[in-house]
């Protein structure tokens, strides 16, 4: 399954969840609901994946975590904030670089329409 195929499924599930519960919940609620929905769609999901920081060839565990990793190909960074800040985009791109992956979706569920809160972030494309 390609990154684009995965992202299409993820976006559909985000819309489904948002229609059911709407905006205003905690990030963890959306993360767990999305993990459930994607697992039910027979996708391989990992939650809260440790992301080591490598500096000068030294691997350091400093507490970074990917919210969801789908099929070991697509990072999902889940937010529930009034407005996404530039740092959210930078953080997501950094996770892509550290994981050596091509695609991430930065998803802000705190929108009237969740489709307005979904942003594709790419690495080396």
Image: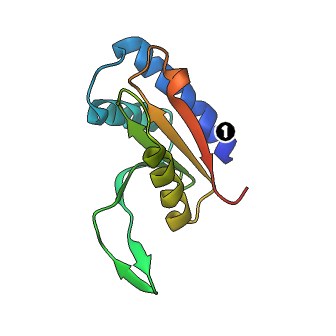
Residue at 57 percent of width and 54 percent of height: 73
Q: Position of residue 4 (x, y in %)?
A: 68, 41
In this view, the residue farthest toward the front is: 86
Give the quadrant of the C terminus: bottom right
Rendered position, 50 above or below 42? below
Q: Residue at x 38, y 70 (%)?
A: 52
Residue 49 placement: quadrant: bottom left
Q: Residue 36: percent from the left, percent from the top?
A: 37, 34
Total tally of numbered discs in the picture: 1
13 to 5, vertically: above or below? above
Using the rendered image of the protein, determine whether residue 60 is visible from the camera's viewpoint. yes
Residue 108 relative to residue 105: left or right? left
Number of residues whose C-alpha sits closer than 10 Å to that of mark 1, classed few (under 14), some (14–19) or many (20 or more): few
As rendered, which of 16 and 85 lies closer to the eye?
A: 85
Can I make out residue 10 in this image? no
Name the element at disc 1: helix
Report whether 123 appears left or right of 12.
right
Q: Position of residue 101 (x, y in %)?
A: 59, 60
Depth check: 86 or 54 in front? 86
Q: Give the residue furthest to the right.
A: 125
Location of mark 1 (residue): 5
Residue at 30% from the left image edge and 34% from the top image edge: 27
Residue nearest the viewer, comparing 23 with 88? 88
Left or right of 29, for residue 88: right
Q: Where does the image place residue 43, in percent across and percent down from the top left?
A: 51, 42
Above or below, 90 against 22 in this view is: below
Residue drawn at x 48%, y 44% is 86
């Amino acid at each position: 399954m390609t990154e684009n195929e995965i992202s299409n499924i993820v976006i559909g599930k985000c819309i489904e969840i948002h229609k059911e519960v709407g905006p205003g919940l905690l990030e963890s609620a959306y993360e767990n609901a999305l993990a459930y929905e994607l697992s039910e769609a027979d996708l391989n999901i990992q939650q809260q994946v440790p992301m080591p920081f490598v500096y000068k060839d030294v691997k350091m565990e400093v507490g970074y975590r990917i919210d969801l990793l789908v099929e070991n190909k697509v990072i999902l960074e889940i937010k529930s904030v009034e407005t996404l800040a530039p740092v959210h985009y930078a953080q997501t791109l950094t996770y892509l670089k550290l994981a050596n992956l091509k695609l991430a979706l930065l998803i802000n569920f705190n929108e009237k329409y969740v489709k307005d809160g979904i942003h594709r972030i790419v690495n080396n494309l």
